[in-house]
C-alpha cells in the first residue's frame, strides 16, 4: 500500500500532514537509492565471483599441465622455458585471486588455502646484515609495567647487489741510495694481461658473463655504462682474445687427461659461423667429449670447435685412444669403430674404439611412435625399457662390482626378452612402417646396446654429454653465431674450463679468478694443480 495514500485517512492538521508526507517521500527515495546501491554491489560481487571462479579454473588447468608433464613431452630446453612460464602464470593467478578476495570480504567463493612447501634455509655462508626491530615503548600498553624479553622471532630475506666497479690503486714508493746512486722499488706483480687496466675480478666478470651467462660483449658494455664506466667492445674483445690464448694450455691438459680414460661420451651440436664473403652464416660444429661418471676420477668435459661434422674431426681429437665410446647413430663415428691397428708387442689386430649405443636414443624412437599413434607396440617397448632404467636407478650408488652383479641378474634377462620380442614383433610389422623403423633402429645396434649390461662401469646412455651441451643451445639464442673459426675455438677453450669446473662442483667464477691470479707466475710442470678439479677429500 502507498503510505502517502494512507496518510490522507489520518486526522492531521494540514501543516503536519505536509511535513509527514515530505518525510515519507524522502524515506521512499532513500530506500530506492539504497536498493540501487545494493543491486550495483550485488552485480559487482557476482562479477567478482565469476572472475574468481574462472581464475580458479584456470589455475587448476595450469597446475594440471605443470605437474603432469612427462619426461619427453618437450625438448629439455623447451621444458625449462615452459616450466618457468607455468610457474610465473600460476603465481600471477593466485595473486589476482587474493586481491579479488581481499576486496570482497563477503565473497561467496571460499578462499583456497595455498599449499606451500617448507621454505629452504638460506645458505649459511652468506654474510648476514642484522636489523633489530624494538618496540616503540618498553612498558606494557595494558598495565604500564616494564616489559621482559622472553625470546626472539627471526626471519631472513635474501638480497643482492649488482656488480660494483671499483679501482685498485697500486702505489710503489721509490727509494734512492745516495751513496751508490741507485733507486729501489717493489716489483710490479705479474698480470695475465701485461700492462692492462683490467684487474682479475673484471676479467672474470667479463668471461663469466660472456661464456657462462651467454651475454654478448655489447650487453656487458651497456651494463658497465649504467655505472658510468666506459668499456668499449673493442677493449673487451681484446681481453677475451688474450685470455683465450693464456688459458689454452689448461684446456689442452684437460684433453690429455680425458684421453687417459677407458670410456667416453661423444656428441656434437651445430653452431652458426659468420661467413663474411657471402654475408651469411655457415654451419660449424661444437664437438663434445665427456668422461664417464661411473668410473673414478674428476669429471671432464671437452669442447672442440670444428668447421664441419666429418668423422675425421673425432679421429683427430681422439688420436690413438682406445676404449668404449658412447655415441648416437651418426655415421661420422663409424670409421672410429671400423679402424684397427696392430698391438706393438703381440702384433694382434685390436679395435681402436668399441661402440656403446645410447638407450635414450632407442627409447626416443618408440616414444615418438607412441606420441603420434598411441601404438601398443611402442607402449610395450617403453615399458620394457623402463625396467632397464629402474635397475640403473637402483644401482646408482653401488660399487662397480655390485652394479655389475645387479645388471647381470636383472638387466640382462630383460634385454634378452626384449630382443626376442622385438624380433617376433618385427615379423608382423609392415615394411617401411614407423613401427618397423623404430624396431630396426634397436635391432641393428643390438650388440652396442647390450654391452653396458655386461659391466658395472659403462653407462646406459649418452645423456651426460647431451646435458653438458644444453647450455650451448641456450647461448646460441643470445650470441646468434660465432664470428670466426678462431672465435669458436677460443669459446670452446673457455667453455671447456668453466664446464669442467661446474661438473666438479666448483664455483666457476671463484676458480677462474683464482687461476687468473696464479697463472702468470705458475710453473708449467705444475699445471695440473690449476685444473678445475675438486680437492680430494
Image: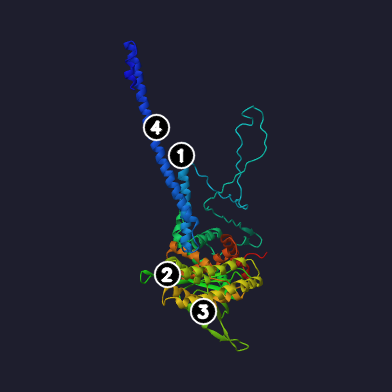
Q: CA distance from mark 1 to mark 3?
A: 71 Å
> Measured along the vertical axis of the image, is residue 495 above or below residue 201?
below
Q: Residue at x 46, y 72 (%)?
A: 285
Q: Nearer the viewer, mark 2 or mark 4?
A: 4
Mark 2 or mark 1, which has the lower sequence index? 1
The answer to which of 40 and 206 lies nearer the viewer is 40
Q: CA distance from mark 2 to mark 1?
A: 61 Å
Mark 3 or mark 2, which has the lower sequence index? 2
Q: Position of residue 2 (x, y in %)?
A: 33, 22
Q: CA distance from mark 2 to mark 4?
A: 69 Å
Q: Residue at x 67, y 30 (%)?
A: 146
Q: Residue at x 37, y 26 (%)?
A: 31
Q: Secondary structure at mark 3?
A: helix
Circle 2 packing at 10 Å, graded few (<14), some (14-19), many (20+), is many
Q: Secondary structure at mark 2?
A: strand
Mark 3 or mark 4, which has the lower sequence index? 4
Which mark is on residue 38?
4
Placement of the C terminus among the 4 image quadrants: bottom right
Which mark is on residue 273?
2
Q: Nearer the viewer, mark 3 or mark 4?
A: 4
Confirm whether residue 440 shows in the render: no
Which mark is on residue 108?
1
Mark 1 or mark 3, which has the lower sequence index? 1
Q: CA distance from mark 3 to mark 4?
A: 83 Å
Which mark is on residue 315?
3
Q: Residue furthest bottom?
A: 347
Q: Secondary structure at mark 1?
A: loop
User: Does the CB distance between marks 1 and 4 fall below 8 Å?
Assistant: no
Circle 4 packing at 10 Å, graded few (<14), some (14-19), many (20+), is few
Q: Residue at x 66, y 61 (%)?
A: 179
The answer to which of 437 and 485 lies nearer the viewer is 437
Amino acid at each position: 500500500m502507498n503510505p502517502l495514500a494512507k496518510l490522507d485517512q489520518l486526522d492531521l492538521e494540514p501543516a503536519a500532514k505536509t511535513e509527514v508526507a515530505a518525510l515519507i517521500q524522502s524515506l521512499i527515495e532513500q530506500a530506492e537509492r539504497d536498493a540501487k546501491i545494493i543491486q550495483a554491489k550485488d552485480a559487482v560481487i557476482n562479477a567478482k565471483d565469476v572472475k574468481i571462479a574462472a581464475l580458479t579454473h584456470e589455475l587448476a588447468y595450469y597446475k594440471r599441465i605443470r605437474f603432469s608433464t612427462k619426461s619427453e613431452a618437450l625438448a629439455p630446453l623447451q621444458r625449462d622455458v615452459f616450466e618457468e612460464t607455468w610457474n610465473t602464470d600460476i603465481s600471477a593467478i593466485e595473486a589476482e585471486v587474493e586481491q579479488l578476495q581481499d576486496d570482497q570480504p563477503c565473497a561467496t567463493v571460499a578462499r583456497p588455502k595455498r599449499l606451500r612447501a617448507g621454505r629452504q634455509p638460506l645458505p649459511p655462508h652468506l654474510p648476514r646484515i642484522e636489523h633489530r626491530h624494538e618496540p616503540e615503548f618498553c612498558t606494557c600498553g595494558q598495565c604500564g609495567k616494564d616489559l621482559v624479553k622472553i625470546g626472539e622471532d627471526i626471519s631472513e630475506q635474501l638480497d643482492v647487489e649488482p656488480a660494483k666497479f671499483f679501482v685498485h690503486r697500486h702505489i710503489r714508493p721509490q727509494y734512492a741510495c745516495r751513496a751508490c746512486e741507485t733507486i729501489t722499488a717493489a716489483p710490479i706483480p705479474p698480470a695475465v694481461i701485461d700492462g692492462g687496466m683490467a684487474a682479475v675480478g673484471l676479467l672474470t666478470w667479463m668471461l663469466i658473463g660472456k661464456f657462462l651467462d651467454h651475454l654478448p660483449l655489447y650487453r656487458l658494455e651497456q651494463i658497465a655504462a649504467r655505472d658510468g664506466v666506459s668499456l668499449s667492445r673493442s677493449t673487451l674483445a681484446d681481453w677475451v682474445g688474450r685470455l683465450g690464448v693464456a688459458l689454452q694450455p689448461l684446456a689442452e691438459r684437460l684433453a690429455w687427461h680425458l684421453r687417459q680414460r677407458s670410456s667416453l661420451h661423444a656428441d656434437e651440436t651445430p653452431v652458426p659461423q659468420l661467413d663474411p664473403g657471402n654475408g651469411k652464416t655457415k654451419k660449424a660444429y661444437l664437438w663434445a667429449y665427456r668422461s664417464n661418471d661411473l668410473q673414478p676420477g674428476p669429471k671432464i668435459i671437452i669442447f672442440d670447435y670444428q668447421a664441419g661434422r666429418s668423422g675425421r674431426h673425432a679421429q683427430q681429437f681422439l688420436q690413438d685412444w682406445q676404449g668404449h665410446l658412447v655415441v648416437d647413430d651418426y655415421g661420422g663415428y663409424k670409421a672410429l669403430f671400423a679402424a684397427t691397428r696392430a698391438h706393438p708387442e703381440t702384433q694382434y689386430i685390436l679395435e681402436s674404439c668399441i661402440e656403446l649405443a645410447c638407450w635414450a636414443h632407442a627409447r626416443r624412437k618408440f616414444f615418438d611412435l607412441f606420441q603420434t599413434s598411441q601404438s601398443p607396440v611402442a607402449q610395450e617397448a617403453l615399458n620394457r625399457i623402463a625396467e632397464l632404467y629402474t635397475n640403473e636407478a637402483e644401482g646408482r650408488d653401488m660399487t662397480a662390482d655390485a652394479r655389475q652383479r645387479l645388471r647381470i641378474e636383472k638387466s640382462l634377462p630383460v634385454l634378452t626378452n626384449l630382443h626376442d620380442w622385438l624380433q617376433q614383433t618385427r615379423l608382423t610389422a609392415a615394411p617401411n612402417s614407423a613401427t618397423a623403423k623404430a624396431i630396426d633402429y634397436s635391432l641393428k645396434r643390438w650388440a652396442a646396446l647390450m654391452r653396458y649390461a655386461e659391466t658395472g662401469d659403462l653407462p646406459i646412455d649418452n645423456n651426460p654429454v647431451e646435458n653438458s651441451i644444453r647450455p650451448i643451445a641456450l647461448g646460441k639464442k643470445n650470441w646468434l653465431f660465432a664470428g670466426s673459426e678462431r672465435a669458436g675455438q677460443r669459446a670452446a677453450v673457455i667453455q671447456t674450463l668453466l664446464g669442467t669446473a661446474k661438473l666438479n662442483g666448483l664455483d666457476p667464477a671463484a676458480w677462474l679468478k683464482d687461476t687468473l691470479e696464479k697463472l702468470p707466475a705458475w710453473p708449467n710442470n705444475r699445471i695440473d694443480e690449476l685444473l678445475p678439479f675438486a680437492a680430494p677429500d
